[in-house]
Structures are given as structure tokens and as C-alpha cells.
Image (cartoon, grey):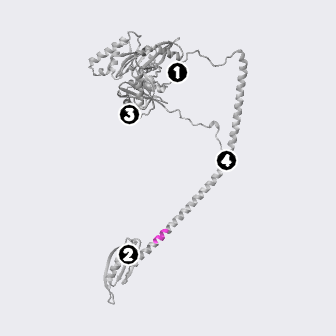
Amino acid sequence: MIKINLNPKREKKKLPSFKKPTIGFPDISLKNEKTIFITVPAVVLGGTLLYYLYLSSKVSSLSEEKEKLSAEISKYNNVKVKIDRLKKEIAENEKISEKLDMKIKTYEYLASSQSLAKELLRYSLEPIPDGVWLDNITISSEKGNIVGYAFDPQYISKYYTDLAKHYEINFTNSESKVSPTNLRYYTFNFEIKNFKLEKKEGKM
Amino acid sequence: MLKIKLPEIKNIKLPKLNLFSKSKVSLGIEVDYDYCRVCSLSLGEEGLILPFMPFEFDILEDKDQSGLILKDELSKRSINVKTANFSIPISSTLYKNIKLPKASEKELKEAIEWNIKEDIENLKASTIFDYAILSEEEDFLNIVVVITKLDAINRILAIAESAGIEPDIIDSVGTSLVNIALLQKDKIKSHKEEKNICIVHIDRNDSFILFSKDDIFLQPLDFDIKRYETLSMDDKEQEVVRLINEINYFFLTINEPKIIYTSGYFIKFPEIKAYMQLKFSSRFILEDLDPIVALDIKYSGNFPLQLYSTSIFLAYRGIEK
């Protein structure tokens, strides 16, 4: 191949050498033939012996290391068993802790529902003015029903106004009645829902 | 006590290192006065392949702008290279054949410098040259010297610098084509006996005959492919007849080869080769100079690559290095 490179930064051209070739081996003549026949096998033998010794020492050091490693493996196996047992214990304790958490949450829920019931009753009963008597009250966290009567409709109106601060009220029914002793009284029925806890109770 | 079976030394398999299995990639860029042709070759386990299709684009007179166009064309194709091999246009090179006695490298260089002294003086400019030994004859060497003006090299260096590429080899188009022909000759049984290499190359700016035995001769041809394209059928025939006459004239003084390699735009205008073969009859066998055959590239596409012989060979030099 014709290799031309006109790049000024090119590598230096390597030309084939046209000088007489010389061989770098030692001159083998009758004079040193004897020495070669003795020294070459001796060097080979010596080298082989050294290599054999090196290999034996390597084998013994490797077998020692093998025994050491076996001992270490058995030691670490015991540790592994212990670690497994501890892992089991940790898993069991975690289960117990979870159960306890569930119980605590249940109690908290019950306590909160108790305080809600108290609040519902308080805000339903406290606003009852004089002159109003309740006949029946059914109440839950979502809705309720209050049935009662009064001698004057204005008492019912006052009760309605005060109760409306905490509930949405559906005033379903009011009737004027006369008792056997000739007393005029009024019945009422409030359907209540959407309880709201006011921060300021106003006039109450 | 737990007994552990350790693996025997002979059964231990060392992991294979794949540090050297990465394929070698090289880029070749043929730079002419108004165009560039770019090609890349990759050497993997399966042999030489083209990582992307070779491409040609126009460049400008401004060296920096041309470098930026080259950079843009490469980045468009996601080609990231640090180094590439370049070629200088055929019209920027002078081939000088010298026969010198065998000598040391220093003596040989001095003898070459003395022999080309007159040619350099005629060029009246700073020059740069390189040489290659083509053959040996007993105590003599047949040497080809490629001489070019320093300006032509500096233009390549400036384009490469602007494109952010470090130029490695800067070859001449002529020697690249002769190398392709030499490699192709060795690949085909019937061509092996041919002692002379003859290439007729037609291209955008320069058309020429290259002849090589123990030397390299370059003979420019008066054949303008741009003009040929515009001619009528009859005029085209006349133009090819004129080309044949020029080739005939060239072989008046030189031993005729049996094979003439056709290169460059012959692939785009197959009628030129067909008409030439008809006229030459059995005197010459016209063969396409094909880098795929010459370099044994694993390529089965239909896109003709004969136009890219120089850039493909430049890439090959990067692989072969």
C-alpha cells in the first residue's frame, strides 16, 4: 500500500532498514558447545525445581487458608441462626405492637363519640325555656327528633330560635289542644340534623 | 462441623475482559474546492461495515464557513469524531517518480529533496512533500514523491479546525485511488496477473488518467461532466469519442494494461462506459473501481459507492493504521 501523509504534524515515517541483517544469538562453536550442553539442562532443571517448590508452598498456604475459611464459615453459621431467631422475635413483637395500636385507636374513637353525645344532649336540652316540656327526644350524631308541648307558642318559638344555633331544624308539626281540665296547650315536633358546634354561644 | 466444598483451582473461570472488543471506527473526508465527501468505516467482529451512508455536500471558498458546514453536516447525522483523515484535491498535487539507490532514511530524504528541488522552485510557493517506496529493484528503490503547496494543506487544516476535528492523515486523491485499485486487483483472480494499474476518473472538478506500475503518472483529461450533462445525445457521443481519443493518445507512450478501472461519475452515466467498451472492444476491459470489493466491506445496499472511493479509502487508512 502507498502510504502518503502530507499532514505537517504527522508521525515520523518508519522506513524499512536496508542494512545487513544481524542475528542476536550467541555464536555456537565447538569451544562453548560443552558448556551449553551442561548449563542448559542444569538451568532448566533448577528452574523446574524452583517452580515446584513455589507451587508446593502455594498449595500449603492455600490449604491453610481453606481450613481457616471453613472455621470462619461454621462460626458465622451460628451467628446466622441467632440472627434468624432475633428476626422472628422482632416480627412477633411488631405484631403485638400493631394489635395494641388498634386497641388504642378504638378507645380513642369511643372516647370521642362519648364527648360528642354529651355535646349533642347539652345543646338540645340546655336551650329549653320555662313553659316547654319534652315528651320524647331521639338523638344521634347525624339526626334527631324532639317532641314536646308548651302552654304558649312563643315558648316553642324561643326554643326553636335557640336550638337553630346548633342544628338545621325541620319544624314538621304543631297542634293546639285542650286538656280534660280545660287547659289549652300546644304540641310540636322538631326534626333536627347537621349538628354544628359553635365557638361562641352568644346569649346562651 | 459444617464442611464447605471449595472450588478447585482448575474449575475457576476467570471473567472475560471485553476491553478490546469495541469496534474501531474511522472517518474519511475528501475535500475538493467546492464539495466534501464523507464516509466512515467500522471494523467489528463481522468485518468492515459502513456505520452510515456516505454523503456529499457543497462547501464555500471561505475555510471557516466550510468547516462550520462540515461540523453541521456531521452533527445532523449524530457523528461525533475527534480525528479524521482528509484528502487534498488532485489539482493541488504533483507526483514525481524517482529511482534511488538503497540508503539510510536520512540519506534517502536528502536525495529526494535534491531531486525535487527544481519542481519545488517551479511551484514558486512553500511546499510540503511525502514519499513512498513503490518497489525495490536489486540495489534501487522506485519512489513516488507527492508534492503539494503548503496553502492547500493549510486550507485542510483550517477547515478541520473550524469543524473541531483533528486531522490525522492527509492523503492525495491519486494515491488513494491507486491503493483501491491495487487491493481490488488482488481480490479478483483474473485481475491478479495484470501488472499495470490504470484508472480513468471523472469527477465534478477534475477528470484524469492515473497509471501505475513502479511509478505513478497523472494525466489530466479534458472532460467536463457538468457540460456533458447538458449536451444532446449526438454531442454526448462526440464528447465520449473525444475522451476515447485522449485515452488512446495517452497509451501511445506507455505499455497498455489489459484492465482499465473506471472511477467517479462513470457510475452516474453508465452510457459513457458502455460506449467506451464498445469502441475499445477487446483491447481493454473496463471495470468499475469498487471500494466494496477492494476492501471487502459488508454492504448489500443499492446506493452506488464508487463516487466515494477516496473517502472510503481514507477511512480505511484509519482502520488499517
Asked if disc 3 and disc 4 are in contact, CB closer than 8 Å, the reply is no
Q: Main secondary structure of the magenta part?
A: helix
Camera-side mark, 2 or 4 = 2
- Under circle 2, the secondary element is loop
Q: Chain of mark 2?
A: A
The amino acid type found where label 1 is placed reads: Lys
**Is label 3 on the same chain as label 1?**
no
Q: Dot 2: few (<14), some (14–19), or many (≥20) neighbours within 10 Å?
A: few
Q: B139 or B159: which is nearer to us?
A: B159
Label 1 and label 4: CA atoms lie apart by 61 Å
Q: Dot 1: few (<14), some (14–19), or many (≥20) neighbours within 10 Å?
A: few
Q: Looking at the image, is mark 1 or mark 2 earlier in the sequence? A: 1
**Observer able to see residue A88:** yes
Q: Dot 2 corresponds to which residue?
A: A202
Label 3 and label 4: CA atoms lie apart by 64 Å
Residue B6 lies, with reference to residue A7, above or below; the image says below
| Residue A173 painted magenta | no
